[in-house]
Image: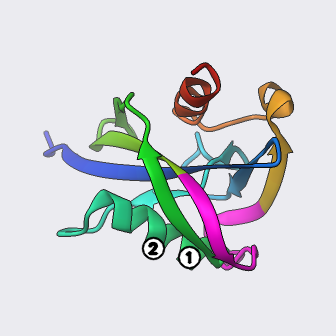
Amino acid sequence: MSEIKQKILVTAIIIQNGKILMQRRTDDIKSHKDKWTTPSGIVEINEHPENAIIREVKEELNLDIVVINVIPAINSFPNHKNKYHLIYLAYVCEIIGGDLRNQDEEGDISDVKWFEIDKLSKIDTIRGTMPPIEAILNK
């Protein structure tokens, strides 16, 4: 039996003018392929999670953001055939600069788009995407 590794994933909930910023994944992970999620990434060793989400959004979308607050609900579940345990932290963020563009078209992101919040139920999202969004909307 192989050892299960733990990973921390951070995600940015960016809402502006009644719309939320989402990205379509093209990962080789079957459960993610062509599904939408909020901008996200893995925390590197010795990196603070807030710094990780700021870095990920800049690298992938060319946006400068500031963290407003953390969503109190944390999702935690086994992932990828139990190869690792994923801890999922969500942050409400605000754009403070940059020009939105997909800087990872050759990588894991095929599209970036603003969705009207009331239309989110109609798009195919990755598991774990909706609970932090719903936590914000239901405040």
Query: Pointer 1 and pointer 2: residues touching (CB < 8 Å)?
Result: yes
Relative placement, left or right, of 41 versus 59 is left
Magenta part of the protein: which range?
Answer: 93-111
Q: Work out which quarter of the rendered image holds the N terminus and state it.
A: top left
- Give the amino acid at mark 2: Arg
Q: Nearer the viewer, residue 116 or 122?
A: 116
Q: Which residue lies furthest to the top in this view?
A: 138
Q: How would you rate the neighbour count of disc 2 (Cα within 10 Å): few for under 14, some for 14-19, many for 20 or more?
A: some
Count the numbered circles shown: 2
Secondary structure state at the residue bearing disc 1:
helix
Q: Work out which quarter of the rendered image holds the C terminus and state it.
A: top right
State the residue at coordinates (75%, 64%).
110
Report which residue position mark 1 lands on. Answer: 58
- Give the colour scheme of this rendering: rainbow
Residue 118 appears in the rendering: yes
Q: Nearer the viewer, residue 28 or 97?
A: 97
Q: Residue 74 carries which label?
A: none
Vertical placement of residue 101 versus 34, above or below: below
Residue 28 appears in the rendering: no
State the residue at coordinates (78%, 25%).
121
Report which residue position mark 2 lands on. Answer: 55
Residue 95 within the segment the image draws in magenta:
yes
Relative placement, left or right, of 92 versus 46 is right
Q: Hey, which quadrant is residue 25 in on the image? A: bottom right
Q: How would you rate the neighbour count of disc 1 (Cα within 10 Å): few for under 14, some for 14-19, many for 20 or more?
A: some
State the residue at coordinates (31%, 50%).
8
- Give the amino acid at mark 1: Lys
Secondary structure state at the residue bearing disc 2:
helix
Relative placement, left or right, of 67 versus 139 is left
Residue 114 position in % (x across, y down): 82, 52
Q: Hey, which quadrant is residue 78 in on the image? A: top left
Residue 105 position in % (x across, y down): 72, 75
